[in-house]
Each structure stands twice: as structure tokens, then as C-alpha cells.
Image: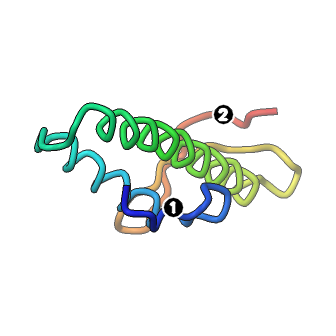
């Protein structure tokens, strides 16, 4: 480990993802001793779970933001040209 790891609770998504990518690279090289590989593998698992939680939280926020005025959620597919495509009936 580099000693630069921030506590998971204060880590930004991009920073966590960058560190996770670094861990994957280090493990793929296969140059680390077993004990160090296990340490960074464990760190990678924690980072992976943290990233998934951040994405789930962001998804919930987006769902709240796209609620209709009557409080019903409508799922819409986002396209890169900015148009929304209605994919479902209102969820109650």
C-alpha cells in the first residue's frame, strides 16, 4: 500500500475508482508478495463496495429528481443527444 489511502467515508467516487484501477494493475502484474497482494485485494473489495454504494445513492437521487409533479416516478432512458425516452408506466 502507498499510505495515501483516504478513509472510505470521505473518498470521492473518481478517487476511489482511480485507486481501484491502480490496485487491479498492481495485482495483474503479479510482482507483489502474497501478503501485500492480499492487503490490496482486500482494499480493492472495500473500494468496489464503496463505489457501488455511491452509484446506488446517485441513482436514488436521480429517481427523486425525475419524479412527476404528482410524486410518481417515471423511468426514462437517457440518450446522449439529450432526448428522453419513456420506458415504463408510472411507478407508484
Residue 11, horizontal then vertical, whole percent:
57, 63
Q: Residue at x 59, y 34 (%)?
A: 88
Residue 23 placement (x, y as % from top left): 30, 49
Density class for disc 2 (Cα within 10 Å; few <14, some 14-19, many ≥20) is few
Q: Quadrant of residue 74?
A: top right
Q: Whole-percent x and y of residue 19?
A: 37, 58
According to the image, label 1 marks what residue?
13
**Residue farthest right in this picture:** 70
Marks 2 and 1, how far apart at CA: 32 Å
State left or right for residue 80 relative to residue 56. Answer: left
Quarter of the figure with the N terminus = bottom left
**Residue 42 percent coordinates (x, y):** 44, 36
Q: Residue at x 33, y 34 (%)?
A: 35
Left-right relation of 28 to 75: left
For mark 1, give the secondary structure: helix
Q: Which residue is mark 2?
A: 89
Residues packed near mark 1 inside 10 Å, few (<14), some (14 to 19) or many (20 plus): some
In the rendered view of the protein, which quadrant contains the C terminus? top right
| Residue in the foreground of this view, choosing between 5 and 59 | 5
Which residue is pictured at 54% across the width and 39% down the height?
Answer: 49
Amino acid at each position: 500500500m502507498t499510505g495515501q489511502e483516504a478513509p472510505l467515508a470521505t473518498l470521492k467516487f473518481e478517487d476511489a475508482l482511480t485507486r481501484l484501477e491502480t490496485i487491479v494493475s498492481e495485482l495483474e502484474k503479479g510482482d507483489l508478495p502474497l501478503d501485500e497482494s492480499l492487503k490490496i485485494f482486500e482494499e480493492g473489495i472495500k473500494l468496489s463496495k464503496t463505489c457501488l454504494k455511491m452509484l446506488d445513492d446517485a441513482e436514488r437521487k436521480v429517481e427523486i429528481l425525475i419524479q412527476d409533479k404528482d410524486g410518481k416516478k417515471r423511468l426514462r432512458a437517457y440518450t446522449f443527444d439529450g432526448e428522453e425516452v419513456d420506458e415504463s408506466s408510472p411507478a407508484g
